Image: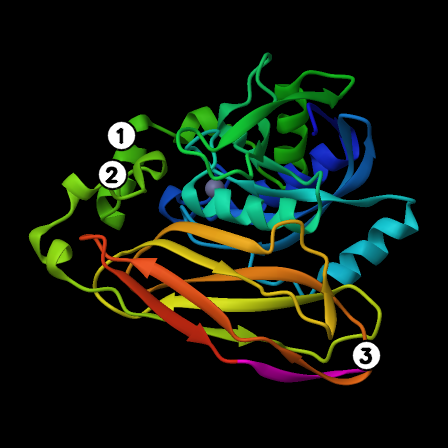
Amino acid sequence: MIQSVIVTKEAYDEMFKYVIEYANPNRPYRQWREVIGWLIGTIEGETATVLRAIPMTSGSSIFVEMSDYTIIPQIAEEANKIDAVIVGWFHSHPSFGFFLSSVDIRTQRNQQSLFENAIALVCDPTKISTIEPGIHGYQVFMDHSRGREYRELDISIDLETTYPAVLKELLLDAGIERSYSDVIAHEDLAALYALEGISPPHLAMAEIGDLLASEKNALPNVVAEYVISTSLQYKKENYVQVKISNIGDGIAYLVDLALPPNYEFEILSMYPRRIVDQLNYDSAILETFKIKPKKEGQIILPSIHVSYRTLDQRKYQVIISAMRVAVL
Ligand SMILES: [Zn+2]
């Protein structure tokens, strides 16, 4: 289990350069966007050292999700070049601080399932001060016990100057002379959430008492399928995804699925069973599993039973059909 994280100056700069591009004092606050990317580095005992950060994609002002796991072999290759491995992922929370949202927890569960020691780093440049590096690190508990589902790691940044000095330099490099404190007010943040019609992220998990009457009576309708974009490689690590969408009007609680064992491939994911606390209407998630095919030609990915509950605890089930895929 990882206890501490060391971030090199190079990785720190790479992360904030990308974060600043999409959320900076020259850009209207309403247009700020979250960004996400991969971390490569080394693991020694209980310490992860982040050597490089690789940008991936940007999302909305308050939401970004890691959806493309087919890129993993490429990231692993990048890591290989510097004798490193994938150590996790980072994303930004521009102006709303350090925590893992329910989506972040799910992404991190995926990461820890694929890479045992994976860490999640959350960056917020607006919080940087002489004592605050603007980056916090987390891992989740994998036992699905209730209560707080993640823990914070000790973090140290390998810098020769202060955090604000580095931030100022990065802003200047991007042609930005104003500072974050010139543009951010707490009221803006409240207004943003009101405009988006959402509650702040730490409250994003809907409590039953908060639901509207129409939501309480609405029924979820979950559909699920395999999403395989390329052919699989024989005897290599491959990433197989299942997409679970709620196309109904109500919320699906405790969406539970497991990739069954199969003689045609080995399951390399540490946690082939996944539980998603809730899946709101009109939302979809991607769960990623790591497998190694034992034969060439074609293999059959087994059918998967996905169960979920409604608000009144009625249990429903949907089946992901078996799928034949090519193995090269
Ligand atoms: Zn987040």
Whole-number angstrom distance, CA of label 2 to CA of label 1:
6 Å
Extent of the magenta region: 322-328
**What amino acid type should be assigned to the residue bearing mark 1?**
Glu
Q: Which numbered disc, 1 or 3, marks the residue that appears first in the sequence? A: 1
Estimate how packed mark 1 is, as few (under 14), some (14 to 19) or many (20 or more) residues with alpha carbons within 10 Å: few
Query: Where is mark 1, residue-wise?
Result: 187
Instruction: Tell me which amino acid carries mark 2.
Output: Ala
Residue depicted at 49% across the width and 44% down the height: 104
Q: Is residue 221 above or below residue 37?
A: below
For this view, does 144 lie left or right of residue 240? left
Q: Which mark is residue 229?
A: none
Amino acid type indicated by mark 3: Lys
Visual colour scheme: rainbow
Position of 325 relative to 264 (above/below): below
Tag of residue 191: 2
* 75 shown above or below 117: below
User: Residue lying furthest left in this view?
Assistant: 213
Left or right: 109 with respect to 191? right
